[in-house]
Every structure is written in structure tokens, then in C-alpha cells.
Amino acid sequence: MQIVDKNITLSELKKMSEKMYGGLIKAVIDVHKEIMVVDAELHADEECFLLENDSEQEHLWGINLFPDKFGTQDFIVFDSMINLRPGWGNKTRGVDDPQIQKKIRTIVNNLVVP
């Protein structure tokens, strides 16, 4: 697992994706701290890591990154079991709130450099 609080290169992500099925990288974003954790088999592991490092549950969202689709709308896919929070208004594995989606896209685009 790797915390990304400044930048990570696209080539680093591509290298990580070689270990995963389908060429993806699992990531959990803290929309409050504007950081992410990457390179784990499960979003839940990344979520746990952030919670142990003072993140708050309501700010954490799971996504998948597809390095080969960098620069397209398909680079970020909102799909994780940790997103399923019906009590908080998120009733799917996606990120239902368009504003949170927008914030996640901004954070990822600021952290990932070509």
C-alpha cells in the first residue's frame, strides 16, 4: 500500500496495475484530506489504513483507476463495496452524489501526473 499525498506518476500506477486482474488499481480517497491510498488487493484494507491514520469514515470513498485509460472519462471508476452506505444516502457501490464524484476526480487529477 502506498499513500499519495503529493504526486504519483502514471508509470508508477501502470507498474502497480500489472499485479491486478484487469489492469486496474484499487484506491481509497479521503475527500477531506485530499489524499489517496493505492496498491492493495482490497479497498477495505486501504480504508482501514486511512482510518488508522486519522481519516474519518464519512470522507472515504473507494474507486478503481485504469492507467491505460488516463485522460479519458473511464480512467476513474466509482465502484467499491465500501461505498455502500444506505444510512448516509449512498445506496450503491458507486458514488451517488455528483458533487463528491467531481471532488474525487479533481483530487485524483491533481495527484496523478503523466
Image: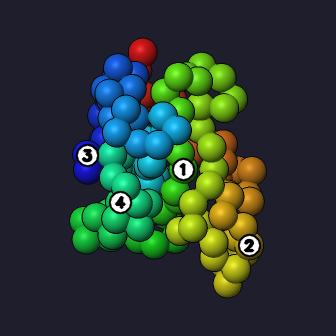
| Type of the residue with mark 2 | Lys
- Residue placed most toward the observer, 52 or 41: 41
- Residue placed most toward the observer, 111 or 20: 20
Instruction: Residue at 59% x, 38% y: name it.
Output: 76
Which disc is residue 91 wearing? 2
Residue to which mark 3 is pinned: 2
Residue, far bottom: 87
Number of residue marks? 4
> What is the spatial separation of the Cα atoms under label 3 and label 2, in whole angstroms?
28 Å
**Lower position in the chain sequence, tag 4 or tag 2:** 4
Q: Mark 2: which secondary structure? A: loop
Q: Mark 1: which secondary structure? A: strand
| Type of the residue with mark 1 | Ile
> What is the spatial separation of the Cα atoms under label 1 and label 3, in whole angstroms?
15 Å
* Drawn side of residue 99 relative to residue 67, left or right: right
Residue density around tag 2, few if under 14, some if 14–19, many if 20 or more, within 10 Å: few
The colour scheme applied to this rendered structure is rainbow
Residue to which mark 1 is pinned: 63
**Lower position in the chain sequence, tag 3 or tag 4:** 3
Residue, far front: 21
Q: Position of residue 65 (x, y in %)?
A: 51, 38
Instruction: Residue at 45% x, 72% y: name it.
Output: 57
Quadrant containing the C terminus in the rendered view: top left
Residue density around tag 4, few if under 14, some if 14–19, many if 20 or more, within 10 Å: many
Residue to which mark 4 is pinned: 46
Please tell me whether residue 33 is drawn above or below residue 21 in the rendered image. Answer: below
**Lower position in the chain sequence, tag 1 or tag 4:** 4
| Type of the residue with mark 4 | Glu
Q: Position of residue 79 (x, y in %)?
A: 62, 55
Please tell me whether residue 58 is drawn above or below residue 67 in the rendered image. Answer: below
**Lower position in the chain sequence, tag 3 or tag 2:** 3
**Lower position in the chain sequence, tag 1 or tag 3:** 3
